[in-house]
Image (cartoon, rainbow, N blue to C red):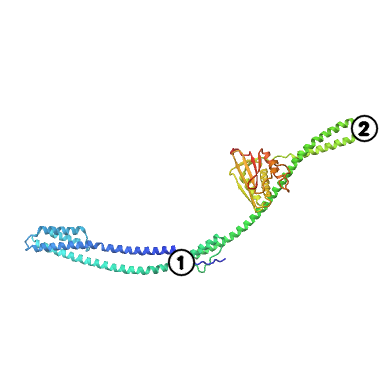
Amino acid sequence: MRAERREANLPIWITVSLLSGLLMISLMIQLAMAWQSYQRILPLPKHIAHLERLQSALFDTEESLALTDGQDAAADPAIQSRLQRYLQELLERGNHLAANTPDGLGAALKVLAADTPEPQLRLLQTLKILRGIFREEAAAHGKLTESIAAAAKFEVELGIGITLALPLSAVLLFYLMRRRIFQPLQQMGYMMELLGERRYQQIPLERIDPAFVPIFANYNSMVVRLSELEAEHLQNRQNLELLVEQAAGTLIAQQRNLAQTERFAALGEISARLVHELRNPLAGIKMACINLQQPLQIGEVQPDAAERIGLVIAEIERIISTLNRCLQGANHEPEPLRAVLVDQAVSELLMLARYQLPKSITLEYRGCPGLICRLPDTEFRQALLNLILNAQQAMDGNSGKIAISAATDGRRMTLAVCDDGHGFSGEFLENGIRDFVSRRADGTGLGLSMVKRFVRNLNGEIKLYNRQPHGACVEIILNCIAPHHE
């Protein structure tokens, strides 16, 4: 399946970010150029001051030379001292540009400090040295000025070039990024959205930049694999749902068979009661017949009368024997108690019950996590199933909710099943649960009877009540908390 191609629109934040980045680069370049200009100009004031002091030294030398009339005349000590101080300061400050300036200043100081009889000659030599230094410094200053002017011209030309090149570079960069980066990535993002919707579409590679072809080829391979896995998943899910439905049907059938067995057990209990009630009067009839048989054997009664009474006694014995066998068959071993995790048992039962209930009826369970009771597990599940089915039948096919809740006060467990039906009748609430008495016309009266017998066998309580505005609730209270919950 091929994907629809989405037109890539460059987000405004990306455009602004790129323009800001280019502007920052331009500003940084301009700042670097300004810094270089500053570094070039920075020596100028110091060198001008250096030239001024050097010129002052020349002036003092010429003045001292002018005041010296002859070769034997002594130089003015104040002017000579000031001249030496100027030269020493120039040498120490080092603001010169010419490389020979320190050597020249040192030579001038040596000449001035020399103790010779010709002071005018010393001054002439010093003047010559200082003029040479001044010429070299002036030439160096001129070169520096020319280099600064050339650099300034270059910076202006570079600034103009950057001003023209930046917009063109930005346009070219936008075009390349849009074509090579943003369009493929936006297309990939769109396809990822389709993946989230389980629409496994491949990306056509014809118009993809070669740099992104391996990525999109891998994506297409992933899409193919995901589509295959999705098909397998759907098939497995359908198979699993079919198996669960079959298993649920089997379990529901078993639950119905168990309910039928419970009904037969209830009938067996009633039969046992009936046997018990019939056996006693039959035994009395037997004894009466035996007592009559003895006088008849010695009396003047017809001979066959005693024989007929003997036959009656024999039939009564056979009936008593049959009733005894029925009574023995009604007595069955109760299911053993075991630790039952109530939430798990109820949840498993509700999972199966949902397959038996109409979709218009919802099941809601509010449990008590970690609650463990010692119960006959099968009888507990059957009793809860009977309560749920009774609640469903009480709603007469209408939509509604069956709410099941489990709670504990520390020693007893209360399990409640409530429905949205019409509720119990006043007569039913007054008389309570009785065998073969149902609140429905088509009911057998054995469901709640079985629940009552289950609760009674565990020494528990059962409560029936209606809730407002409509509906009925059945609560069973069992003393069944496991030892570690006590």
Q: Is residue 3 above or below residue 336?
A: below
Quadrant in which the N terminus appears: bottom right
| Quadrant of residue 14 within the rendered picture | bottom left
Note whether residue 121 is visible.
no
Q: Could you say which is closer to the camera, residue 298 or residue 483?
A: 298
Residue 232 place in picture, x, y as percent = 61, 59
Residue 209 place in picture, x, y as percent = 48, 67
The answer to whether residue 122 is left or right of residue 445 is left
Q: Secondary structure at mark 1?
A: helix
Q: Which mark is residue 178?
A: 1
Quadrant in which the C terminus appears: top right
**First reached walking from the N terminus: tag 2 or tag 1:** 1
Q: Is residue 337 above or below residue 353?
A: above
Note whether residue 36 is visible.
yes
Q: Report the amino acid beneath label 2.
A: Val
Q: From the image, tell me which residue sits under label 2.
A: 301
| Quadrant of residue 462 within the rendered picture | top right
Q: Could you say which is closer to the camera, residue 378 or residue 109?
A: 378
Residue 33 place in picture, x, y as percent = 31, 64
Q: Report the amino acid beneath label 1.
A: Arg
